[in-house]
Amino acid sequence: MIRDITLGQYYPVDSVIHRMDPRTKLFGTMVFIISLFLADNLGAYALATVFLAFCIRLSKVPFSFMVRGLKAIVFLLLISVSFNLFLTDGKELFRFGFLKITVEGLRMGCFMGLRLIYLVIGSSIMTLTTTPNQLTDGLEKSLGFLRVVHVPVHEISMMMSIALRFIPILVEETDKIMKAQMARGADFESGNLIQKAKSMVPLLVPLFISAFRRATDLAMAMEARCYRGGEGRTKMKPLKYERRDRGAYGVYAVYLAGIIGINMVL
């Protein structure tokens, strides 16, 4: 399951979405997330499904690779769906002792499950098609207006980019430590939830030590290269909007208008 976490990984392939400006992809991701919270009927989710499938097709990233990331949130997904399924009042369909399933609960549970799945896949498209450097530049440019109120935009963008870059590194490190512990007789699979949590302690301690060591090495390397923040720094590849980016903004506007229109009609 550790290897199934795809957040923060970059999938190198030549596609339209890979060549798009990172600001366009960030804005598109925000539009898609907002649309999922606005959607409250089958028509809106059908349009979201078509839009997501279109983006996956354009990205040329294998669908099976994106779905791998869902395995890491199965537990969260089950909890969210169960809470909506059993704790929503309405017209009763079935009853299992003190648990009951209502029409409204079934509807809310399905929509919540779809929303979580689409959120993970939609966010994965952005991280899989954008390098950490591009993401840093895109965030810095997109949040540039906050400099007026003295918000350290460059530093925030750098921290978010480094955090995303560290996710696949820490996942790989966790997998190595887990295999080393299993070779020494550790058991991470058997037992109840409390026993599994206790068995993770020998895994977490060396992982935190390794993470702090990597962070210290990175800080020393940046200091040795005279890194002093974003003030006065130039870019090797300045961001520039192309025709495909302007077309993407038009697609976003049409998509969001379609979601709002479907909600108003249905």
Image (cartoon, grey):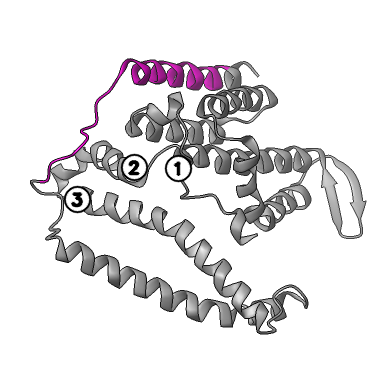
Q: CA distance from mark 3 to mark 1?
A: 24 Å
Question: Can you give x and y, in whole percent of width and height, for residue 145 in the image?
Answer: 20, 38
Which three-letter amino acid code belongs to the residue tagged 2? Answer: Leu
Q: Is residue 69 left or right of residue 93?
A: left
N-terminal of the two: label 2 or label 1?
A: 1
Whether 113 is drawn above or below 188: the answer is above
Question: Can you give x and y, in whole percent of width and height, for residue 118 in the image?
Answer: 60, 38
Instruction: Name the chief secondary structure element in magenta.
Output: helix
Which three-letter amino acid code belongs to the residue tagged 3? Answer: Val
N-terminal of the two: label 3 or label 2?
A: 2
Which three-letter amino acid code belongs to the residue tagged 1? Answer: Thr
Residue 254 located within the stretch drawn in magenta: yes
Residue on which the image places disc 1: 127
Image mark for residue 75: none
Do the numbered discs 3 and 1 sit on residues whose CB atoms are within 8 Å? no
Question: Can you give x and y, in whole percent of width and height, for residue 217 in the image?
Answer: 29, 70
What residue is drawn where x is 87% and y is 60%? 98
Residue 10 located within the stretch drawn in magenta: no
Residue on which the image places disc 2: 135
Residue on which the image places disc 3: 151
What residue is drawn where x is 76% and y is 46%? 89
Do the numbered discs 2 and 1 sit on residues whose CB atoms are within 8 Å? yes
**Element on which disc 2 rests:** helix
Disc nearest the viewer among 3 and 2: 2
At label 3, counting other C-alpha atoms closer than 10 Å, the crowd grade (few under 14, some 14-19, many 20 or more) is: few
Whether 264 is drawn above or below 71: the answer is above
Magenta residues, start to end: 233-261
**Element on which disc 3 rests:** loop
Q: Is residue 164 left or right of residue 76?
A: left
The quadrant of the image that shows the N terminus is: bottom right
Disc nearest the viewer among 3 and 1: 1
At label 2, counting other C-alpha atoms closer than 10 Å, the crowd grade (few under 14, some 14-19, many 20 or more) is: many
